[in-house]
Image (tube, grey):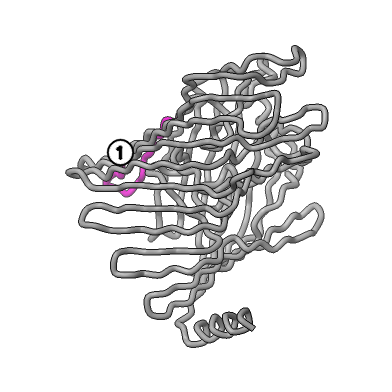
């Protein structure tokens, strides 16, 4: 009876609320730039966002339809569904949602509130995030913003197991997962303005998004407990915008295994952005990892049980690009022509930890309102003399992507 009353109240609220919607339909195709064969990975064919507003309350929903050309199979996904209340002191949101922290574009060491979907690791923003059941409170006092987050479930990264066309080498699908004993995660963030700068400090206590080995015989895995201290800053100096982030990770194994690991490591990202007089945006971003301390052991296929060191330690949280290199430089440029109907983008990612780079370019053209034609190229360059180099392995993933998008 109680459930029926709550459902009726929810539906009544929606009926008398102001509704709005947006979304897109985006059929696209990705083919190898070397032989023209299809790269048979799923993609988001469509996305729909719905919202309902009533007084100080909003209800927001984001759903997506994933499709795979090779099998002609589709899968619907509820990415977000949450309620937002706007009291006089700030904002409260509860439900399945994607929360974002950090200051730089795309590669955020401090943004570990949600897991990543590695099918979309080369995309930016929330497109590559996985929603989780959580509650967030934003409290404003003068120039200060206080944020508290509680995440009620542990959601791991979505890894593309058994995908021959996925560019990164992944282990086989684990046979058993050790459940996280205390899945509730907590986060706090303090943000303020100092002069012309926006500064934030954050803390998050949770569990890794990527698994660690617990038992190689039964192929059982678990998720280490990890806490993160973070800081970020945004500075404006004339036409230049500087953004920076740094995060310090404390991780420890808190499940039963002979491979107990305790470690401390860091990640950073520094970005400089400049817009020219002709509205061309230039961007440079330096990202990297730093290892501080290790204790414990791990399994090596050739040597058996070995001490944990930098070369065999696997990070369970942080930037997705951290699995590619310990240090990299991303540079990009973008501009618009013909009243913004034509958008041109170019980028390069240079591996500073060794040989290897990625080159990319994109052309987006809108022939009529709400329609956009997309053409993009991503080319990976490794080192023939280094077959184990990540960028050498990524060469086969060099591709061209073509699609037509309709926005509504």
User: Of 42 and 288, which appears nearest the observer?
Assistant: 288
Residue at 48%, 53% in the rendered image: 150
Q: Is residue 368 above or below residue 294?
A: below
- Image coordinates of residue 209 in percent, x first then y, are 60, 41
Query: Residue at point 44% right, 40% down?
Result: 110
Q: Is residue 387 left or right of residue 218?
A: left
Look at the image and tell me whether residue 100 can be seen.
yes
Look at the image and give the residue range highlighted in magenta.
Answer: 274-287
Seen as rendered, the residue at the extreme top is 303
Q: Is residue 307 above or below residue 54?
A: above
Q: Position of residue 29 (x, y in %)?
A: 68, 52
Answer few, some or many: residues within 10 Å of disc 1's Cα (few below 14, many 20 plus, some between 14 and 19): some
Residues 298 and 107: in front is 298
Q: Residue furthest left?
A: 195
Is residue 147 rendered to the left or right of residue 238?
Answer: right
Image position of 222 with respect to 16: above or below: above
Q: Is residue 183 shown left or right of residue 204?
A: right
From the image, give the main secondary structure of the stretch colored magenta.
strand
Q: Position of residue 140 (x, y in %)?
A: 28, 58
67 relative position to 286: left or right? right
Residue, x 32% and y 43% (percent of image)?
200
Q: Which residue is mark 1?
A: 242
């Amino acid at each position: 009876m109680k459930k029926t009353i709550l459902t009726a109240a929810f539906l009544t609220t929606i009926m008398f609320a102001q509704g709005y919607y947006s979304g897109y339909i985006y059929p696209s195709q990705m083919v190898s730039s070397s032989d023209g064969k299809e790269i048979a990975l799923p993609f988001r064919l469509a996305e729909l966002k719905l919202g309902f507003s009533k007084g100080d309350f909003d209800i927001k929903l984001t759903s997506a339809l994933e499709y795979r050309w090779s099998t002609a199979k589709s899968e619907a996904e509820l990415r977000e569904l949450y309620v937002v209340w706007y009291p006089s002191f700030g904002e409260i949101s509860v439900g399945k949602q994607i929360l974002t922290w950090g200051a730089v574009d795309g590669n955020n060491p401090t943004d570990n509130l949600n897991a990543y979907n590695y099918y979309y690791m080369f995309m930016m923003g929330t497109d590559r995030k996985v929603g989780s059941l959580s509650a967030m409170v934003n409290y404003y006092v003068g120039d200060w913003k206080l944020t508290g987050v509680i995440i009620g479930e542990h959601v791991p990264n979505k890894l593309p197991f058994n995908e021959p066309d996925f560019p990164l080498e992944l282990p086989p699908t684990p046979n058993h997962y050790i459940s996280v004993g205390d899945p509730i995660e907590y986060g706090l963030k303090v943000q303020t303005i100092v002069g012309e700068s926006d500064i934030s400090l954050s803390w998050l206590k949770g569990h890794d998004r990527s698994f660690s080995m617990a038992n190689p015989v039964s192929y059982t895995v678990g998720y280490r407990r990890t806490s993160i201290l973070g800081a970020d800053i945004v500075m404006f100096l004339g036409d230049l915008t500087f953004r920076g982030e740094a995060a310090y990770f404390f991780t420890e194994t808190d499940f039963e295994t002979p491979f107990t690991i305790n470690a401390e490591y860091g990640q950073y990202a520094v970005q400089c952005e400049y817009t020219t007089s002709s509205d061309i945006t230039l961007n440079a971003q330096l990202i990297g990892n730093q290892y501080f301390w290790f204790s414990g052991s791990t399994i090596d296929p050739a040597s058996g049980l070995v001490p944990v060191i930098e070369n065999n330690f696997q990070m369970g949280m942080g930037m997705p690009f951290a699995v590619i290199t310990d240090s990299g430089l991303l540079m990009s440029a973008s501009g618009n022509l013909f009243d913004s109907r034509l958008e041109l983008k170019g980028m390069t990612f240079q591996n500073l930890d060794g040989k290897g780079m990625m080159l990319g370019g994109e052309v987006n053209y809108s022939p009529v309102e709400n329609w956009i034609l997309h053409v993009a190229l991503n080319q990976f360059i490794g080192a023939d003399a280094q077959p184990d180099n990540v960028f050498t392995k990524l060469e086969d993933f060099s591709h061209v992507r073509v699609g037509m998008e309709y926005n509504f």
